[in-house]
Image (cartoon, rainbow, N blue to C red):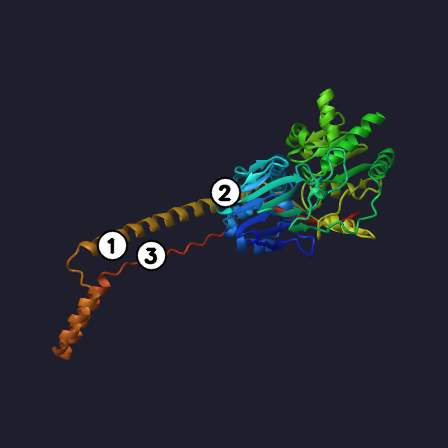
Amino acid sequence: MGTSVQVKPLCGVYNENPLSYLVSVDGFNFLIDCGWNDHFDTSLLEPLSRVASTVDAVLLSHPDTLHLGALPYAMKQFGLCAPVFATEPVFRLGLLTMYDHYLSRKQVSEFDLFTLDDIDSAFQNITRLTYSQNYYMSGKGEGIVIAPHAAGHLLGGTVWKITKDGEDVIYAVDFNHRKERHLNGTVLESFVRPAVLITDAYNALLSNQPPRRQRDQQFLDAILKTLRADGKILLPVDTAGRVLELILILEQYWEQNHLTYPIFFLTYVSSSTIDYAKSFLEWMSDSIAKSFEHTRDNAFLLKHVTLLINKSELEKIPDGPKVVLASMGSLEVGFSHDIFVEWAADTKNLVLFTERGQFATLARMLQSDPPPKAVKVTMSKRIPLVGEELAAYEEEQNRKRKEEALKATLVKEEESKASLSAELAVGDPMVIDANIKHLLQMQSKHLSNKQTEKSKGIRSRNKNSHKMNNLLSILSLNCFPKIKDRRLSSCTGA
């Protein structure tokens, strides 16, 4: 009997939504990717919520939100508890990506979909595999073998191969055939006639791309033209994905041409991102690995790119031409959003996108053809409460604590009373079983109506005396915001 494979797309089919697939191999359910978008739209996760409890293993393919962004939320809210598998770079860089998104959101709103602890909890038990390493599933998955292979798109990016009884299931999304500065191309063509191939067509219409050398030169020419005109360049980037390729392009070009214009990489985790990149040379292109092997030259020992983790550090830099790579690439939140608002009105400056923005984001809007003449941007900022607002908040918090304490006390008393009543019901011989009570009532029909009414009254009072008085405390918990959002709408020239 052949292997049974069932594929159920949960998200990301026929549109640009984040990716998530449920793949069942002889009844063993793989959740391949657990993506979310930069809006963190919970409606996208409804299909996942219905199947999360049936998942036996999770496979992650890339270290960005579109492939793993929903993992902390799914584990916290949907009860997803299956073992998770990924490469070491996807694990490390994916963790940093989620940190960066959380911190960016928390700076401008009361973001509560997940916390840093939720992120840590979701990532702490991930099993890390190396490329081409076979991992043999056990228990319900006995006989199934999984192995990650290079996708060529992001550092650690994976084409997953699932094998059962000689039949291969290949999951290959966001792969890249071309060799780049820091990555080799995909190994997808090495797989011969898989039983099932799951792939995407996101870039299918971009077939007339120029050669890499020409494309990189166009990118650098646009930057130099702006810098020489005394302008500033904003590159909205992801946290730890394609930004690594851009950093290498700039670093090498600045070194070769002895340029002195400052370059800054600004995210909440920029230092950690580059530290991990330095340690992942074996996951990179052959040229980088050989260079390090022969000369001990690490490509990510940056001489021209300065790492920043706070916008205040950037504001201390003297005004003048500069290049800033800042997250998020969608321009929805993060340092890139704030810098865009500050720089976009000056025609000397340049906002340069290196990849297509996520659907329905500010970045995608600016990439439309023709671009808009003006865009409306909402600025949000968390401001500490002071004065009367702070006093009112503290008073409200004290009231809530007292109500919670009272509620806990009442619940404890009710539990004690219920326990005591149960003990009395077991040990008191005077408590009459309902069936015996019914027989006694049948035998008492010969009594007069007056006596019957009287006995009924006595029984009613006895019954009521054994009832438990349930205390129901309805507490009005009006949440007074700890941080007050002050929103400012402005029109900014694109």
Residue 147: x and y in percent read: 61, 40
473 displayed left or right of 204: left
Tag 2: amino acid: Ser
Q: Is residue 166 visible?
A: yes
Mark 2 and mark 3 residues within 8 Å of each other at the beta carbon: no
The tag on residue 311 is none
Quadrant in which residue 274 is drawn: top right
Tag 1: amino acid: Ala
Q: Distance between the residues labelled 2 and 3?
A: 51 Å
In this view, the residue in front, 3 or 156, is 3
Mark 3 and mark 1 residues within 8 Å of each other at the beta carbon: no
63 displayed left or right of 493: left
Mark 1, residue position: 422
Tag 3: amino acid: Leu
The tag on residue 471 is 3
Residue reaching furthest front?
A: 1
Considering only vertical position in the picture, is 463 above or below 109? below
Dot 3 alpha-carbon crowd within 10 angstroms: few under 14, some 14 to 19, many 20 or more = few
Q: Distance between the residues labelled 3 and 1?
A: 18 Å
In this view, the residue in front, 461 or 233, is 233
- Which circle's residue, 2 or 3, is located before the other in the chain? 2
Quadrant in which residue 89 is drawn: top right
The tag on residue 138 is 2
- Which type of secondary structure does the marked residue at label 1 adopt? helix
Looking at the image, which residue is at 71% across and 49% down?
A: 358
The mark closer to the camera, 3 or 1, is: 1
- Which type of secondary structure does the marked residue at label 3 adopt? loop
In this view, the residue in front, 279 or 348, is 279
Residue reaching furthest top?
A: 295
